[in-house]
Amino acid sequence: MSAPPEAYMSLVKVHRLLSSVRTLALRDLGVVMVGREAINVKRGDEVSLPLWLALELHRSGHAELREVTLRDIDLLKYCHMERMSRGGKLVDVREDLYLSAGMSIRKLGGERAPDSSSSTEKLKKALINLLDLRLGKLMSAALYLETRHASEVSNVLEEMVLYALLRKVIKSWRDSVLGYAE
C-alpha cells in the first residue's frame, strides 16, 4: 500500500458503486443491461441493480432504492453494542454501514419536513459517535503488529483499508525510531 489514502478510499467508493442493491421500479424501464444480462424491468418489479444505476434511476424518479438506508435507532444500537463489546474487538455490523448511513443522512437532509433537520443532526451525531468508537478499536488493533489480516479485524471494507494503512504507518514509524539504535 504505497498510494495516498484517498486513492484507496476512491477505489472503495468505486467498489460500492458497482455493488448490487435492491431497486423498485416506479415506472416501466424496458430492457436494462445488468452485467451481461438483459433484464426487462416493469413498474413494480424489484430487481438487483448496480448502485450507480439505481442512484441515477432514483434521481430521475424512475426507481426507489431498497435496503440501503439506515435509521438513527440502528446506529444507536451499533454504538451501544460497540461500547459493550469486550476485549477491543469490533462488533460485526452491516458491510455497507458507512454507505447506508451516508445515504440516509443525504436523504433526510433533502426532505422538507419540519423535523428532518433535527433528525439529520441526530443521525450525523450517532454516526460520528460510532466512527470514534470503531476508530479507537482499529487503532488499538493496528498497534499490535501481529500478522492479522484486515478481514479478521473488521467486515467493513472502509475499515479494512484504514487498518492496513495504519499498520503500515505504525510499522514504518517504529522501524525509523528503532533505526536510531543501529
Image: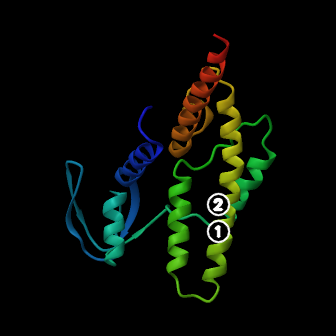
Q: What element carries label 1?
A: helix
Q: Residue 177 carries which label?
A: none
Residue found at x 31% / y 77%: 60
| Quadrant assignment, res 49 | bottom left
* Crowd class of label 2 (few under 14; some 14 to 19; many from 20; radius 10 Å): many
Horizontally, residue 147 falls left or right of residue 81, namely: left
Q: Is 46 positioned to the left or the right of 140 in the image?
A: left
The answer to whether the residues at label 2 and label 1 have Cβ atoms under 8 Å apart is: yes
> Quarter of the image containing the C terminus?
top right
Task: Give coordinates of residue 20: x percent, y percent.
Answer: 38, 53
Please tell me whether residue 132 is drawn above or below residue 27 in the rendered image.
above
Identify which residue is drawn at 64% across, 60% down. Answer: 127
Which residue occupies 62% across, 48% down?
93
What element does badge 2 sit on?
helix
Q: Which amino acid does label 2 sit on?
A: Leu
Does 165 appear above or below 32? above
Tag 1: amino acid: Leu
User: To which residue does mark 2 refer?
Assistant: 127
Rounded to the nearest angstrom, the CA distance separating label 2 from label 1 is 6 Å
Residue at position x 68%, y 54% in the image: 130
Q: Name the residue under label 1.
A: 123
Percent x, y of residue 152: 60, 30
Residue 55 image-quadrant placement: bottom left
Q: Where is residue 30 in the image (x, y as percent from the top left)?
A: 19, 69
The foreground one among 125 and 85 is 125
Label 1 Cα neighbours within 10 Å, binned few <14 / some 14-19 / many ≥20: many
Total numbered circles:
2
Q: Looking at the image, what colour scheme do you see?
A: rainbow
